[in-house]
Amino acid sequence: MEDEDIMTKEEKELLRQQAIEANEQRILHLETFLDGFPLDTDVNKTVALEIGTAIMFIEQETEKLKSYVFE
């Protein structure tokens, strides 16, 4: 593998931080959407449940990213 194909620890850390920030923005966007979402129909309740599940998975991925340490 050539040297230019290998990422430095600093580059990896920058990408990790950017991914965490992007995930946090996704979560905020979805939570804001849900705040005003009416739960007046079964379809809306199902959509809200799916969005809640997506938020949970994004939060899990974010926690994994936060735990990574590059050596």
Image (tube, rainbow, N blue to C red):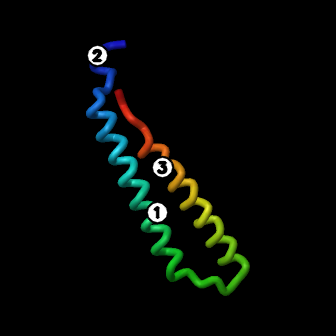
Type of the residue with mark 2 = Asp
Circle 3 SS class: helix
Which of the marked residues, 1 or 2, is nearer the chain's N terminus?
A: 2
Who's the residue at 55% across and 80% down the image?
37
Which of labels 3 and 2 is toward the front? 3
Could you say whether the residue bearing mark 2 is in a helix, strand or loop? helix
x and y percentages locating residue 27 in the rendered image: 46, 63
Q: Which residue is drawn at 31% across and 26% down?
A: 7
Labels in figure, total: 3
Kindly check if marks 1 and 2 are in contact, taking CB atoms under 8 A apart as contact.
Answer: no
The answer to which image quadrant residue 4 occupies is top left
**Relative height, residue 36 to residue 11 (above, below):** below
Q: Please identify the residue farthest to the bottom as the structure is shown.
A: 40
Residue 45 — which label?
Answer: none
Q: What residue type is labelled 1?
A: Ile
Q: What residue type is labelled 3?
A: Glu
Label 1 sits on a secondary structure element that is helix
Towards the viewer: 17 or 3? 17
Residue 3: mark in rendering: 2
Image point (42%, 38%), residue name: 68
Q: Mark 3 points at which residue?
A: 63
CA gap between label 3 and label 1 equals 13 Å
Residue that carries the numbered disc 1 in the rendered image: 27
